[in-house]
């Protein structure tokens, strides 16, 4: 492996780790600087884990301790690009507008449909996708709402509908 390939591999590994580290620091800042930290216990724990794991991964990436090639092949990047696009739409549009559970259901169903190798022509496979999405969302609800007692974000769109229904 050439020196140029080693540098490219280090840079390619460092960039996503730096993004994850920045996200972890932002979540930590937001969750530790609130007046009542009790509802933010889960984000605090996740942010601490993100920061620790990201720092360790960054240390390994910069040192060149990970065995990598020249980077991600283009065909692999093209296969994961739709998933990344769905995640961005989820974070930027679905979750804020529809809320955590509805947005997550739409995002999960979309990802599952994109990457499911089964036929998209069969009604049975669509029913399977819907059933698995409903089961997944039930587990997510049980974990977050009941077990962890985390208040999840409500979407602006659904909040407006609820307010409109209550007011008249």
Image: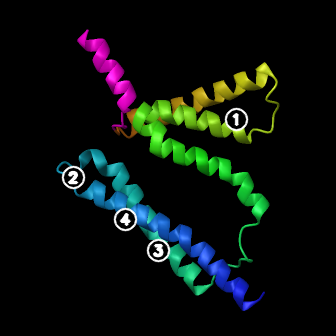
Q: Which residue is mark 2?
A: 34
Q: Which residue is mark 1?
A: 113
Q: Which residue is mark 3?
A: 55
Residue 108, horizontal then vertical, whole percent: 59, 37
Task: Check disc 3: other Cα within 10 Å, few if <14, some if 14-19, many if 20+.
Answer: some
Q: Residue at x 76, y 89 (%)?
A: 2
Q: Residue at x 41, y 34 (%)?
A: 97
Mark 3 and 1 residues: CB-CB less than 8 Å, in contact?
no
Residue 127, horizontal then vertical, whole percent: 71, 21
Which of the two marks, 3 or 4, is nearer to us in this view? 4
Provide the secondary structure element on which disc 3 rests.
helix
Which is nearer the N-term, disc 3 or disc 2? 2
Name the foreground residue: 162 vs 29. Answer: 162
Distance from Cα at disc 1 to Cα at disc 2 = 38 Å
Q: Quadrant of residue 73?
A: bottom right
Mark 4 and 2 residues: CB-CB less than 8 Å, in contact?
no
Mark 3 and 4 residues: CB-CB less than 8 Å, in contact?
no
> Can you see residue 143?
no
Hey, which residue is sitting farthest left in the picture? 35
Q: Residue at x 62, y 33 (%)?
A: 109
| Scheme by which the image is coloured | rainbow
């Amino acid at each position: 492996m050439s020196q140029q390939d080693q540098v490219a591999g280090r840079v390619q590994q460092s960039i996503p780790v730096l993004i994850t580290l920045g996200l972890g620091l932002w979540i930590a800042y937001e969750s530790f600087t609130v007046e009542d930290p009790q509802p933010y216990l889960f984000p605090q724990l996740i942010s601490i884990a993100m920061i620790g794991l990201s720092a360790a991964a960054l240390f390994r990436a910069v040192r060149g301790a990970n065995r990598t090639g020249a980077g991600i092949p283009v065909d692999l990047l093209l296969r994961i690009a739709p998933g990344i696009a769905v995640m961005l739409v989820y974070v930027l549009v679905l979750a804020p507008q529809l809320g955590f559970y509805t947005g997550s259901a739409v995002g999960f169903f979309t990802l599952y449909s994109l990457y499911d190798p089964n036929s998209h022509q069969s009604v049975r496979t669509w029913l399977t996708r819907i059933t698995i999405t409903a089961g997944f969302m039930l587990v997510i609800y049980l974990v977050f709402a009941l077990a962890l007692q985390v208040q999840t974000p409500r979407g602006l769109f659904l909040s407006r509908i609820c307010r409109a229904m209550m007011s008249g």
